[in-house]
Image (tube, coloured by chain):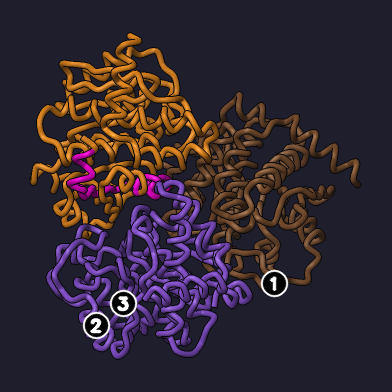
Chain colours: A orange, B brown, C purple
């Protein structure tokens, strides 16, 4: 998979927030993809059409960038280019949740990548979100992911202790990763655009493609955490590991996990 | 204090500049706070109302973000949520100084966190500012901080070789820190939002709370500088140290300083 | 040269994209310059007039920042302040290429700093650009740089394996640097503003000034790459090396290269 990304070097059009844009661009470069991050409505259609995938992120959404997301998303839909939506802090404001709904209604979103609180907001369920963090709630996240995927007709990825991927029928759970991944900003945002890069280079079963990406990403995180236990170090080590982790190292780690289970 | 932040994990609504937003978010996460960085006027009231503190920073101010700052600030004032204002480059343009004045007139700002040049601009005094840097001048910064705090009815924090905190009556001087802290962008901006996080979790004497935060922050800086003497390393080491520095290490450092004095 | 920057500490007004703004600010601080990054049209003229150089970068251009670039650029032109233009992704959209043309027509740009794909777009030639990356083409880049410099009456800097600087008459080729410099986002953007900082402190032959800067920058990159072979490490090491590399180390490296040639 990641061998493919390195070979094909897909262009990913990211309309994303300024908090994570540097980290997201460097993470995409690390795995061998090319980010382009224009966000003016005037160029949204052209940039989306140039790209092999579109990644939309609402972290510092405003009226103009929402306009661009809709244009880029619709262009991508028309051209069959995969779109990943990251509804950052969807439950934090009416502005955000209305934006998510508008995007979901008008764009053919391939993957909704979120945390549990954002999923609850998208699904219209009560949840104690904490700003842009997952927060706490009593919902059965897996069930909600399945019903949301079914209802919206897309893949839902919910990251947390265990990552979940579902197309509304099957569910895959990914047991890798490390809590330190949540100690820096942008690991979720970057993951969304890495998913976009994966969809750009692989065709076939999207559930398999996306779960492969999640495994790779979570394993990169846990391996980076082995030498970097503080967040400043981790930010650096994670980019390093995204650049250096090989498909065979991933396979080996999955194999050792399966032996444990 | 910082034990408190880690336990209560306060949500800090930051409307800040894109130059430092990643560093500021990671610094807040490092001390155990949760940043949310929305800046659309449409959601400014909701985000401020969700938060336990609001941090306003004018580094890359524009008309829309100013609108958001005014809405978020007024909402916070109404709800008794502390607001910290960082008037980045206040003296560099009429747009900035007018924005500072408008915010100070309409928002109940708890703390003005600035450098000497910015203080002079806010107070309407001549000063050779250097863009967003402190620059040089001949004013008695301590006196100006006191009179400004008195006049505006808020805490003034002026950072520099010696940090100053004053409520217009008492003044506390903080002798910690290291010049390398000024060699990377955003240490002042991050400090402002760390002050906001401190005010979010502690009630009682604001002068004490804020001076405790300044000591912690400056000591984190000087300790990070012990192993990181170049700016790339320092940016990483400082985030590490913010995450790992304990209240007792801070107490020990203050004690050793007092013995020296 | 860089001794000069450290002594004179020039203020560089950067209107730049949010993907690289932190890296660009820290890089400018590392070499001893002071960045100011305001981008509101309301303050563009004042900030440009305060500065010793202006650096315009189109990475996440939008209508408002284009307005600011035109105001800042015209102000600088009137005052004889050098302007460097970085036409990021010029070929990726009509919005960008029209913006480049408008800036070039109305602003007295001193240096156009770009990659081969962006040069082709500016010159109106066919080229397989890849988003904001150089991409591939069959043009003679050196010839195109010369003719573009002549036609526009400015210095053209094209970075790549070999960096090229030309004023339309003479051409200087810089053989230093390392491919890892392209593995993180922003090395080109930062270079453009470093060129601006150099022009701010030196008068005399611009071709010599700019080629000196390019050598310094490329040598900092190759030296950082000696200890940092992964992109996370390289981003940190490069800022370190920009801060620590001395004019005499540069001279020594150039001398050893010349002996090889």
Q: Which residue is mark 2?
A: C148
* Residue at left offset 14%, top offset 45%: A76
**Discs 2 and 3 lie in a common subunit:** yes
Secondary structure state at the residue bearing disc 1 = loop
Look at the image and say whether residue A22 sits in the magenta stretch: yes
**Residue for point 32% across, 9% down:** A261
Contact, mark 2 vs mark 3 (Cβ under 8 Å): no
* Residue C29 appears in the picture as rendered: no
Percent position of residue A135, x then y: 44, 23
Instruction: Check the image and report above or below for C117 versus C72.
Output: above
Residue bounds of the magenta highlight? A3-25
Which residue in the structure is indicated by mark 1?
Answer: B127
Q: Chain of mark 2?
A: C
State how far apart marks 2 and 1 are (Cα).
44 Å
- Where B5 falls versus C191 (above or below)? above
In the image: residue C261, left or right of residue B193: left
Q: CA distance from mark 2 to mark 3?
A: 15 Å
Position of the N terminus of chain C by quadrant: bottom right
Q: Which mark is residue C103?
A: 3
Label 2 crowd (10 A; few <14 / some 14-19 / many >=20): many
**How many callouts does the rendering have?**
3
Q: Chain of mark 1?
A: B
User: Label 3: how many residues lie within 10 Å, few (<14), some (14-19) or many (20+)?
Assistant: many
User: Where is residue B191 shown, x and y percent of the image?
Assistant: 63, 46
> What residue sits 24% from the left and 69% below the top?
C116
Query: Image check: B208 left or right of C106?
Result: right
Instruction: Place residue A248 in its image quadrant.
Output: top left
């Amino acid at each position: 998979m990641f061998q493919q990304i390195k070979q094909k070097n897909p262009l990913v059009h990211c309309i994303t927030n300024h908090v994570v844009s540097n980290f997201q661009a460097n993470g995409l470069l690390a795995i061998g993809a090319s980010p382009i991050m224009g966000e003016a409505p005037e160029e949204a259609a052209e940039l989306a059409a140039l790209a092999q995938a579109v990644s939309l992120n609402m972290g510092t959404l405003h009226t103009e960038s929402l306009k661009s997301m809709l244009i880029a998303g619709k262009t991508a839909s028309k051209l069959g280019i995969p779109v990943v939506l990251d509804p950052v802090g969807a439950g934090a404001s009416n502005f955000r949740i209305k934006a998510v709904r508008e995007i979901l209604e008008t764009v053919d979103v391939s993957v909704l990548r979120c945390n549990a609180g954002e999923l609850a907001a998208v699904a219209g369920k009560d949840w104690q979100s904490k700003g842009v963090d997952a927060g706490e709630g009593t919902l059965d996240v897996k069930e909600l992911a399945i019903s949301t995927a079914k209802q919206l007709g897309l893949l839902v990825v919910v990251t947390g202790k265990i990552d979940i991927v579902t197309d509304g029928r099957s569910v895959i759970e990914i047991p890798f990763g490390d809590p330190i991944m949540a100690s820096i900003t942008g690991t979720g945002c970057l993951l969304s655009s890495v998913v976009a890069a994966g969809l750009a280079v692989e065709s076939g079963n999207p559930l398999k493609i996306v779960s492969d990406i999640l495994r790779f990403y979570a394993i990169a995180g846990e391996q980076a955490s082995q030498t970097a236990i503080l967040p400043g170090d981790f930010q650096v080590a994670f980019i390093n590991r995204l650049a250096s982790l090989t498909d065979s190292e991933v396979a080996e780690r999955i194999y050792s996990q399966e032996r444990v289970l």
